[in-house]
Image (tube, rainbow, N blue to C red):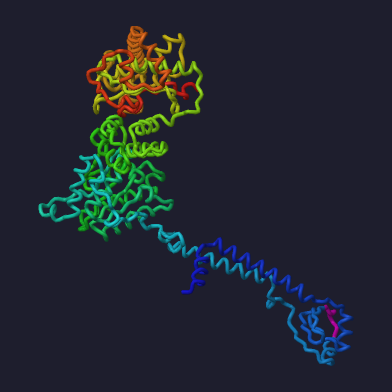
Amino acid sequence: MSRKFKKSRDYLQKGPKNLVIMVILLVVSFAMLQYFAGAIQKINTLSYRTFIDKVEQDEVKAVLVEGNEIRGTLTDNKPFETVFPEGDKDLWPLLKAHKIDIVARSANTAGQFTFWHFLLLMMAILGGMGVWHFLRQTRGGGSGGGGGLFNMGKSKAKMFMPSMLKETFDSVAGADEAKEELKDIVDYLKNPSKFGRLGAKMTRGVLLVGEPGTGKTLLARAVAGEANCPFFSISGSDFIEVFVGVGAARVRDLFEQARKKAPAIIFIDEIDAVGRHRGSGLGGGHDEREQTLNQLLTEMDGFETSKESVIVIAATNRQDVLDKALLRPGRFDRIVHMPYPDLKSREQILKVHASKVNLDPEVDLQKIARGTPGFSGADLQNIVNEAAISASKRDSKTVKIQDFEEARDKMTLGKERKSLLLTEEDKKVTAYHEAGHALVALLMPADSDPLHKITIIPRGGSLGVTHSLPEREKYTQSREEMIATIMMCLGGRIAEEMEFGKMYTGAYSDFTKASQIARNMVRYYGMSQELGTVIYGQEQTDYKYSQKTAEQIDKAVKELVDTCYNDARALVELNRDKLDKLAKELLEKETLYAKEVYKLLDIEPRPDFKWTNEEEDESEAMAGNPPQIDSDSEKATA
């Protein structure tokens, strides 16, 4: 195939847009051609009398007669035209007498090729090429590829062959229990006869349940990588189409492809998009989504009689909305939970991602892991990446601990707002507010989390933050711990009132958190003596309660918060000198770590407090919760 022909073919395949442009150019070219042709060969219009005179003088060479119109050329080859009157019977004998070439034609224009004929021809060509392009697209042959109207029922799943899968269980840090559950799947895919010899039927479907970012997709790819088998990946939303029946057709095509490549793994991400409870959709349960779910249920049941080793792995963070038929044994037999990583898992995840950056030898990843409870694997990856970006902006050769500190604060609070201009009064209010939080935290018993850092540097919507440091992974909380947290939340407002004698709006987020903890203690945890150990849930749940009970709940919550407020105020009043000293130091340094605060206030550290040795370079090892107290919110002041 010549290069020129190939270019022309590619040009035509670009679609109707190029066809329209091409036809327009042809029409314009024809019009210009007719215009210039008429301008070059100008036709003279003669009167009939003049025409007769020239015939008699033998100046006419040839004529074309159409109806009562005459066109012809003179002996000097100049064209002319005229009209003869009807009923003139002397014209023909005159033309014959002077031996003039005569061509006669009936008075219709069927054979006359004019501009409008050309235009109609071009429109017909355009229509034909448009139909051709449509048929080509519907058969999936367009330049975009990947389907069309007739290929709409084809699966959109991406197939990854074993050579394309680099992930293994070693690539997934943490999630030890989940990996243990999935090792049986790997063994079955590698050696199905191992289980069949004793009559065991291997799990046909595995449902991975976890919050976003916990590594569900990565773990599914790791299973395929360990089993060294093809991996079909698709999202639940890829099955859904506006046309009824398309989703079911795609499900059939997907399983058909997987059986041809067996042993194989089908991974359906966000299966809740297609697997929700039936009967709640449009059309009384006959909508496209539910038809797709029915086909999925049928295909998974079909595995019982199939010899092919095909495992379905699905992922969702909304197990509660899935149809019961989808979760019954024989379909998704195993439900593997992917919780937020614990301390050990977070450290392993950080090691995986930190191995890709130039880490400073003094960075302790265990302390960073200890300071990030509730962070998902994706969050931890982002922390390492943000720390590397911070180090790059400083032109540092390595990623240091302060880069991780900056990354954590940026993720939880937002970027430092250097352009925010605060008045001296605003700074002083913020300093006393944060000093109140910190002082209550320092003076509380060992039930509360110890202090980690105080700062009055504005970030995001916050003008200052007090961080607390959990010394261990916590899975339950005592009543005393929650009381201590409420008192710490209220310490900011207490300090403001004691110093300035008036209230500010910065305690809005503190009150929100304190109220929520107190309400949970009363309604869900049975920690109210008046209401006892009874759960009082939302009105739309099974735990309904009367208006009188609602009033009792409100009263119990208020009494609990008021008691915490009075106790915290008494604590601050007894240590007023420490409050003033701490606020003054904050105004000067803006950020204080726990070790500096203990020395400043001459307070003995708690028995469970762990000293760090990074204080000298003002980059104490990062370890702390996402901010426990978020004060002076701009949202509140607005």
Q: Is residue 329 above or below residue 371?
A: below
Q: In which quarter of the image is residue 438?
A: top left
Q: In the image, what residue occupies the spot 43% across and 60% down?
A: 145
Q: In this view, does 70 lie above or below 164?
A: below
Q: In this view, does 317 lie above or below 472?
A: below
Residue 368, visible in the rendered structure: yes
Residue 490 magenta: no
Residue 88 magenta: yes
Q: Position of residue 194 (x, y in %)?
A: 13, 54
Residue 475, visible in the rendered structure: no
Residue 504 or 31: which is nearer the viewer? 504
600 vs 199, left or right, is right
Q: Position of residue 422 (x, y in %)?
A: 50, 21
Q: Position of residue 277 (x, y in %)?
A: 33, 41
Q: In which quarter of the image is residue 280?
A: top left
Q: In this view, does 429 lie above or below 49?
A: above
Q: Is the magenta stretch mostly helix, strand or loop?
A: loop
Residue 636 or 242: which is nearer the viewer? 636
290 vs 632, left or right, is left
Magenta segment, which residues? 82-89
342 vs 158, left or right, is left
Q: Where is residue 636 in the image (x, y as percent from the top left)?
A: 46, 22
